[in-house]
Each structure stands twice: as C-alpha cells, then as structure tokens.
Image (tube, grey):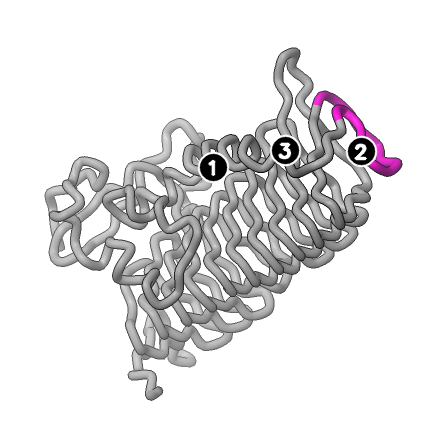
C-alpha cells in the first residue's frame, strides 16, 4: 500500500500511469469522436472529467457562432406556445420541430444563453433550462416529452433522449446514444447507452458502452456524504503501487469501449473499466482498475469478494 500521495494534476502527461490515460479506455482511431480533443488535451481521464465545463462552454460558443447564419432566431420566444421566463435565444434550422413545455432563461441582466436546434430534430414537451449555459442539439435527435435538459449541454446526431431523462448540465453526448436516466458532468461517446432510470455523474463512457436497468454509479463515498461539502477530502486511487490524489472528492466511473454494467449493479466512486469489461447483474464493484476482456461478479454469500474471469470473444 502506497503511503506518499501524488497530486494527479501535477504529473506530466507522459509520466501518468497507463491505467489513468485516455488511450487505455478509448480508441479514437477505430471509433472517431468529435470531442476527443477534450481527452487528448488533458493529462488523464480524470483531468478530462474536470475539464468538461470549460470545453463544452467554449465549443458551444464557437459552434453556435459559426452556424448562426443558417438558422432562424427567436429572442425570448419560440416558434410555438411555451411557458417562458428570463432571457434566452432559440436558433432553429429548417425542418426542426421545437415545441418545449417550458423554457427557463437567464434571470440576470445582460446574460443570455442559446439553444441551437439542428435540422430533423424533434423537441416536444421538454423542459429547457438556459439559465447557466447554452445547448446544442444535433441533427435528427429526438427529445421526448417529460425530459429536462440544462446547459451547458452538447447532444450529437440521431440520439434518442427518452421521457424522464434529466440532463443536469456539463454533459456531452455523442452520436446515436440512447438516454433516459439522470446525468451530470459526463461524456458519453458515440452509441453509448444509459437508457433506463438511474444516475450517472462525473464519468466518461466509451463507444457502445451500456448500462442495464437500474445500474448506477456512485460518485461520492457514502461516508463522505456525512461531511460538509467544503470539508470533504479528495478521492485517492491506488495505481501501480502509488497513491494518486484526483483533486476532487467526486468521480463516478470511467468505462471503456464496449464495456457494460449489468442490471441493478453499482460501482464505487473511482471505478475504471477497460474495454470489453462486463459487470454481471446485482454486483457491487469497489473502486479500482478492471479489465480489459474481463467478467466481474460478486460471489454469493461471501462478503467483499469479486470474481474476475476472462471474457472469451
């Protein structure tokens, strides 16, 4: 067990252990991702989690400015009846359907955020929160009634956001995702699925990763929740015989390409799954590093035991 604790943010990228680097979990050559720059510009996967807000805010500003000439603008109103409060802007491309239930804009003078809705998108009966950041909805994405979306938020093309989903801000969703749960400060790459009611926070999810029904990721230790938020200690993970201080108390999961979390399973804060790692249903996985090509399951009647078996492909 390591005794000296290393601050991860101070480690040069080339000196960061392989298990904390993005290339260990995500293959952007095989599965290109529009926002791979977020991960490539930071020294570690956790650095990418910390950088979501800054990256998303800049990308939204740059992209909306570039695409503005090709869309119709509505200031503090929409193209259809909706309950609205505050200052906001709606930009609609031809062929987009935007019929939200409510829009909450910025309440501070001089602040105005934008929702950009690309062609082929359907937003019907959703609650849109533009108080803290802008939103971009990519082509042919469908947002069903009863969804809540909060900026900063980037949604890719042909993504399905199902009734009951709550995207709480600082989220980046790739193309072809399916979403229903509550998500906060996360990146889900192309074809990643979080399609059932549950919670996902402060996490990275690779290409075609999947969460079964009611699978969840704890992002704060249960005893850390008993401490005032300003007094919580940073999460520490053991890697290659050294202890690394992540710099913040919260982290959910880093789940690599093609990995899955089975129904009703839960991962502890600071869980890392390399590609093709499968968690069986009804399992509790402690923080640490697992995979690649591995099956994880709890051993019935034996407390704290995780069986680790090779995944045959």
Q: Residue at x 36, y 44 (%)?
A: 38
Q: Which residue is mark 2?
A: 78
Mark pair 3, 2: CA separation: 18 Å
Q: Name the residue that disc number 3 marks.
A: 69
The residue pinned by badge 1 equals 59
At horizontal 52% and vertical 52% (from top left) the residue drawn is 173
Q: Residue at x 18, y 36 (%)?
A: 10
As for residue 4 lying within the magenta part, the answer is no
How packed is label 1: few (under 14 Cα within 10 Å), some, or many (20 or more)? Answer: some
Seen at 59% across and 33% down, the residue is 134
For the record, the magenta segment spans 75-87
Image position of 66 with respect to 154: above or below: above
Position of residue 135 measured from the top left corner of the image (x, y, whole percent): 60, 38
Pinpoint residue 172: horizontal percent, then vertical percent: 50, 47
Secondary structure under tag 1 reads: helix
Q: Return the mark for residue 171.
A: none
Total marks in image: 3
């Amino acid at each position: 067990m390591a005794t000296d604790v290393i601050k991860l943010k101070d480690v040069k990228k080339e000196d960061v252990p392989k298990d904390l680097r993005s290339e260990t979990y995500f293959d952007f050559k095989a599965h290109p991702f529009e926002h791979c720059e977020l991960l490539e510009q930071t020294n570690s996967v956790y650095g990418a989690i910390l950088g979501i807000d800054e990256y998303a805010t800049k990308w939204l500003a740059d992209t909306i400015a570039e695409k503005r000439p090709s869309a119709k603008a509505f200031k503090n109103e929409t193209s259809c009846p909706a309950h609205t409060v505050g200052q906001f802007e709606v930009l609609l491309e031809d062929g987009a359907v935007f019929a939200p239930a409510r829009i909450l804009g910025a309440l501070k003078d001089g602040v105005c955020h934008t929702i950009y809705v690309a062609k082929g998108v359907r937003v019907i009966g959703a609650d849109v929160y533009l108080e803290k950041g802008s939103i971009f909805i990519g082509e042919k994405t469908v947002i069903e009634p009863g969804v809540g979306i909060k900026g900063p938020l980037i949604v890719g093309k042909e993504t399905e956001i199902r009734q009951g989903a709550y995207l709480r801000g600082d989220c980046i969703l790739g193309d072809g995702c399916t979403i229903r749960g509550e998500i906060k400060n996360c990146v889900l790459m192309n074809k990643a699925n979080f399609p059932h009611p549950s919670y996902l926070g402060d996490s990275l999810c690779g290409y075609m990763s999947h969460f079964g029904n009611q699978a969840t990721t704890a992002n704060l230790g249960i005893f850390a929740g008993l401490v005032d938020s300003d007094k919580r200690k940073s999460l520490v993970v053991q890697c290659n015989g050294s202890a690394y201080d992540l710099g913040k108390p919260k982290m959910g999961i880093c789940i690599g390409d093609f990995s899955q979390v089975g129904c009703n399973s839960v991962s502890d804060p600071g869980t890392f799954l390399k590609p093709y790692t499968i968690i069986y249903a009804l399992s509790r996985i402690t923080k640490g590093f697992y995979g690649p090509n591995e099956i994880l399951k709890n051993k019935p009647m034996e407390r704290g035991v995780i069986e680790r078996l090779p995944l045959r492909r």
